[in-house]
Image (spheres, rainbow, N blue to C red):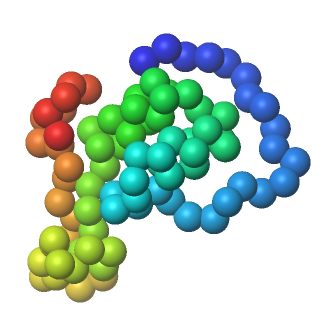
Amino acid sequence: MPFRGGRTDAWTPGEFGTPEPQQDLGTLRESFRKQGFSDTEMITITLCGHTMGGVRDADFPMLVSASTTPGQPHIIDFDTTTQYDNKV
């Protein structure tokens, strides 16, 4: 993943919320565009999130069974590999 040092400071807050899986491609592209990302960067960010991310029982109880350990969420990883790849 290429690294570009530096950043552009934001002087006003962005839109609230995270892109949702049920949103259409046009909505997703516009959301990322407003944040200064190209289509390629949008895909890269999404891939990275799915490689390292997971689903918590509290957020998606229809997908993840409840935790059996009090005070600890039950999390299912999106990706079972330990490398960046396209196996999501």
Residue 25 screen position, x and y as percent? 41, 46
- Decide which of 62, 20 is in the foreground and name it: 20
In the image: residue 47, left or right of residue 45: left
Q: Is residue 21 visible?
A: yes
In which quadrant is the N terminus drawn? top left
The correct choice, above or below, for 22 with respect to 25 in the image is below
Whether residue 66 is situated above or below residue 15 in the rendered picture = below
**From the viewer's perspective, is residue 68 above or below residue 32?**
below
> For the point 50% across and 52% down, which residue is it?
27
Which residue lies at the image location 33% right of the left edge and 35% below the top edge?
A: 47
Vertical comparison of 47 with 83: above or below? below
Residue in the foreground of this view, choosing between 7 and 39: 39
On the image, which quarter does residue 33 sit in?
A: top right
Q: Dividing the picture into quarters, in which one does residue 32 lie?
A: top right
Residue 55: x, y in percent? Answer: 26, 62
Looking at the image, which residue is at 29% across and 43% down?
Answer: 50
Tell me the quarter of the picture where residue 35 sits.
Answer: top right
* Residue ID at (17%, 60%): 76
- Residue 29: x, y in percent? 51, 42
Q: Is residue 1 shown left or right of residue 8?
A: left
